Amino acid sequence: MPPMNSSDLSVLMAVCLFAGVVAGGGAAPPPPPADRFDDLVTLFKDFRSFQKPKLVNGAPDYSAAAMAAQAARIPEYRKRLAAIDVSGWPIPQQVDWHLVRAELNGLDFDHRVLKPWANNPAFYVTVFDEESDQPAREGPFAEGAVELWSYRFPLAAADAAKIGAGLRAIPVLLAQAKTNLTGNGKDLWLYGAKAVRQQSGVLDALAKKLNGSPADLAADVVRAKQATDDFAAWVESKLPAKTGPSGVGIENYDWYLKNVQLVPYTYAEEVALMQRELGRSRALLAMEEIKNAKLPVQEPVAGNAAEYDKKFNDGVTEYMAFLRDHDILTIEPWMDAAMRARIGTYGPPPREFFSEVDYRDPELMRTHGYHWLDKGFLVHHPSADPIRRDVLLYNIFDTRTEGHATGWEELMMQAGMFDARPRSRELVYILVAQRAARALGELLMQGQGKPLEEAAAFACAHVPRNWMRMDGNLVRGEQHLYLQQPGYGTSYLIGKIEIEKLIAQRKAQRGDKWSMKAFMDDFNSRGQIPAALLRWEMTGEKTPDIERMLTP
């Protein structure tokens, strides 16, 4: 028999997804009708190409004319998607259809509401010296990111050329931005200017690392920094005239949750859930403190790098052993190294919130470090599904990635990880409280039009022990992200709630055959898709809340 072509193979792989079936061959089918999965794949690929801005003089074109032309063509893609009948498809393929719909809706929302190219100066920051722990960098950014952390110094000639190409686009892009930016959101401009200034600092640091690199790269860095400094000054010069709120409003927020983030809750429901999580975590913290009152105070790692390295490496060892010995997760050889590579380095006080936690129990935040395992699965187990193989746009993955990593902290506590260190249970509830407080800060900004400073002050006031403070950098950086990317600040606990519901449903379905290890193997195999869709797919149950979310 003749071999299958790539279109036929994509259909078979998708049908057999998660079953471990490998296609070997078969007769070529007739031309596919409009409800075939390969039509969805073709649409997905066409849309991904269409979604990217065109390059003009080496830089992405976000001009008013280019964006208007793109917006005008979105209905074409909606029509193609609507023409694909998925009613008889297996649930994983129906989920894929909704993923494509969500990305289409994300671009539509960008054009109708967010308009980051016109409203958000930080959108034009494109140089980064730290790796994101997410599948794609958090928040909206222009095309053409220069991810400096991914290169080794001194640079090889090929790497220097890649960096140089990215840097040469910056003067063109930032000159264009001065024409594109017309928005009136005060906080987006204020904190956008700070983000641009941070890019200047990153370029300063890069200039000091170029020994042994091609000489023309140094000139590219100088020009990129000059353009960045000039752009920052321009943004700052416009600040006095910026007086409007930067949030999207409740009606738009509700639409975005349902149609882009694929979250089965409204703004009002999220407010209630976050208030509940804040109250629950602080009350349970109070009870833990009563229970542990006679135990020694949990002191942070003392002031030297050697102790830090030992304790944090020991934390990885203990964490991986716990997962293996309790049959929670299939441990693969690459995982240990992935976790050790992210333990960081010692830093003296004063410390930001997460270091206050991390330095008191170096194992606890390794649970949230599941992010690095998620990224490892993308490399070591790329999906056979051509839609899930690519990272979802618009941070649509956040309820899965952030939600699972956040929920994993409390799940591992309940599984017994901290039984020998009861004071660490207090830390888990402090973490939940911090996520709830900053989520409520996002909801204040997005739904009530509150300024970022007020949202930040609210979050700090509701995090126990004064561990998140207005004199630090963390709280404003987090709230700035949540102002730019609606739904991100709430995704940690909304995703946690969804995954807890998923575990409960699967346990009820499996009964005595339930296995956490088997559950996690299945969970990890399905890609980084919204938690509610993952719940539908893994349980086969389209519950009323999911039905409501998926109904136009």
Image (cartoon, helix red, strand yellow):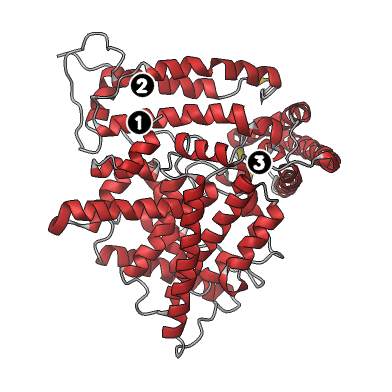
Amino acid type, callout 1:
Asp
Q: Which residue: 30% across, 47% down? A: 523
Give percent across and percent down for residue 454.
69, 57
Q: Quadrant of residue 486?
A: top right
The residue lying toward the viewer, choosing from 254 and 162, is: 254
Q: Which residue is mark 1?
A: 96
Amino acid type, callout 3:
Val
Q: Which residue is mark 2?
A: 40
503 displayed left or right of 410: left
Give percent across and percent down for residue 139.
58, 42
Q: Quadrant of residue 250?
A: top right
Depth check, mark 1 against mark 3: the one in front is 1
Does any portion of residue 535 appear in the rendered image?
A: yes
301 displayed left or right of 537: right
- Against 242, is 354 above or below? below
The residue lying toward the viewer, choosing from 184 and 320, is: 184
Query: CB of mark 1 within 8 Å of CB of mark 2?
Result: yes
Depth check, mark 2 against mark 3: the one in front is 2
Q: Which residue is mark 3?
A: 127
Label 2 crowd (10 A; few <14 / some 14-19 / many >=20) = many
Amino acid type, callout 2:
Leu
Q: Quadrant of the C terminus?
A: top left
